[in-house]
Amino acid sequence: METLTRTVNTPVAPLENGWKGHQRFLFRVAFIFFVIMSVPWSWEWYRNFFTIDWTSLHYRDLYDIARFQPAFIKGSNRVLYGYAEWFIILGVAIIGAAIWSLLDKRKEYNILYYWLRVIVRYRAGIGIIGFGFTKLLPVQMPYPSIGLLNTNFGDFTPQKIYWLSVGIVPWYQIFAGVIEITAGALLFFRKTTLLGAILLFGALGDIVYVNFAFDGGVHVYSSYFVLFAAFLILYDVPKLYNLLILERLTTPVNIYPSFSQSWLKYTRTGLKSLTIIVFLGVLFYVQLINFLYDPYKQPAMSGVKKLRGLYHVSEFRINNKVIPESPLDSMRWQDVSFEKWSSLTYKVNRPVKLDLSNGGGSPMRDINRTFELTGVAGGRRVFYYEADTVNKVLYLQDKNLAERRRNRGGVAKNDKPVVTDNWIPEEARKNIGDETYKIDPRALSARRIRGIAKEKALETKRNRMVLKYSTNDGKTVILRGTDENRDSIYVVLNRIDRKYALSESNLEAGKY
């Protein structure tokens, strides 16, 4: 049964009285194309979905449900090959539509058109809400770390400059999140679909252009939502043209299925309510926990509080040989920073392999969270450390694995897992504790527990340092031990209380 709402003297669109041949063919193409585009085609997606522990959720559990797109070509989501996949799907849709045309002689597809719009509405709505919450609670583009604040502007890639530019103004990032979430929420309701689609088209169209202009990595995924929004807007284009261009009286005419039976009404209401509760309610809560205690691009564990800050290297020795201060020396450390979290950074006059990613993905281990080093040249080194605060020893590992191909988990591909070599003594291990549980208990999740164990099993050997630290007042810090080349080093650091023109944000993620 169909319900048709019509107003007298309202121009009747072709879709209402019987479709023309080309309209039927184009619809068949669009139906096949958008259904394929709206369905997860990765076994990993289904594996993740069916292994979610709903009693111990991590924000990424729901985010990964919402964030998918066709990815038949390996690595296509990061390059222009992603658009090639669309043309492949379009080719399949055209062939499928031709076969469909031979088998089906119906004159119109009004009800099927309604259901196709439902599929596109909910796919776009859920996807953009997952995207938007990482901005509403600003973790997608973090506030710059101390090391980044003291890196030369010319040593940043264009993508890094853009991400940091948004990161220093979190209220703008929040505004972008509000727009995206509002657009997604409006798409859940038939009467506000056009408004939501227009909002989505404008917001994501801007992001597409920004990613092309700044050589960003998410232009394909952003274009995906622009395409969906354009399809939804297309339905109302004749009415908008009639109203705004021809200036004629226009009353929308909508055709949709009848939900007169009770079980249909309850099913429809139940599924819609469940979607809204999960992706607007539950996702907001788990994202809030992530923002407060486990920001996904920043390390989660707190660093040694007494060491935090920026330092000038006043003395530097290698194998007991004093290396005079010089910005041209390739061995001597320059400005050193201990971050709020478990990172030590320093600069050397020696190029390092540039990591061109944006430090995203979903690694659980702090050592694999690389936003502070990605897109940064100029010899900036970043080391993750585990601190034995009893014996005052830092066990450091290089976070940069750019010389190896990285997967989304943050570990190196095509490398054999390293056999545990117990480079950290057992006594120190006991003092350091288990990294899995060294965060606020409210942020502990089944995904974190499983993820850390998996990443440890796949980890490869990195450059390492073992440094003993000493300080009386925190203003002067002495480091002594062995560096990555197993040379003995002795470093004297003097704290710098640098004043920045940039105002410190009160919306920085994480509690350290």
Image (cartoon, rainbow, N blue to C red):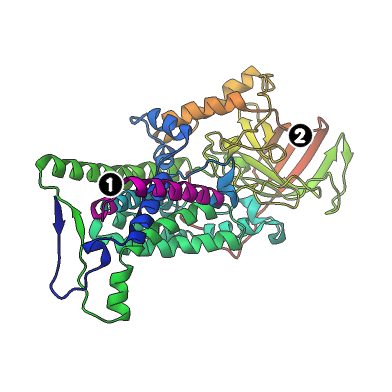
Q: Which residues are magenta?
A: 84-113
* Relative image position of residue 488 (x, y in whole percent): 82, 32
Label 2 vs 1, first from the N-terminus: 1
Query: Which residue is depicted at the point 48% across and 55% down?
Result: 222
Q: Is residue 199 visible?
A: yes
Circle 2 residue = 480
Q: Main secondary structure of the magenta part?
A: helix
Residue 185's disc is none
Query: Which residue is depicted at the point 84% across and 44% down?
Result: 331
Few, some or many C-alpha atoms within 10 Å of disc 2 (few <14, some 14-19, many ≥20)? Answer: some
* Dot 2: element: strand
* Dot 1: element: helix
The vertical placement of 501 against 98, above or below, is: below
Q: Which three-letter amino acid code belongs to the residue tagged 1?
A: Ile
Asked if residue 149 lies left or right of residue 318, the reply is: left
Circle 1 residue = 276
Few, some or many C-alpha atoms within 10 Å of disc 1 (few <14, some 14-19, many ≥20)? Answer: some
Residue 465, by quadrant, is top right
Q: Nearer the viewer, mark 2 or mark 1?
A: 1
Residue 68, by quadrant, is top left
* Relative image position of residue 45 (x, y in whole percent): 44, 35
* Relative image position of residue 64 (x, y in whole percent): 44, 40
Asked if residue 296 lies left or right of residue 355, the reply is: left
Residue 55, by quadrant, is top left
Query: Which residue is depicted at the point 55% across and 47% down?
Result: 77
Asked whether 414 or 444 is in front, the reply is: 414
* Relative image position of residue 142 (x, y in whole percent): 53, 52
Q: Please report contact status of discs 2 and 1: CB closer than 8 Å, yes or no.
A: no
Confirm whether the magenta stretch covers residue 112: yes
Confirm whether the magenta stretch covers residue 373: no
Asked whether 87 or 160 is in front, the reply is: 87
Q: Is residue 141 visible?
A: no
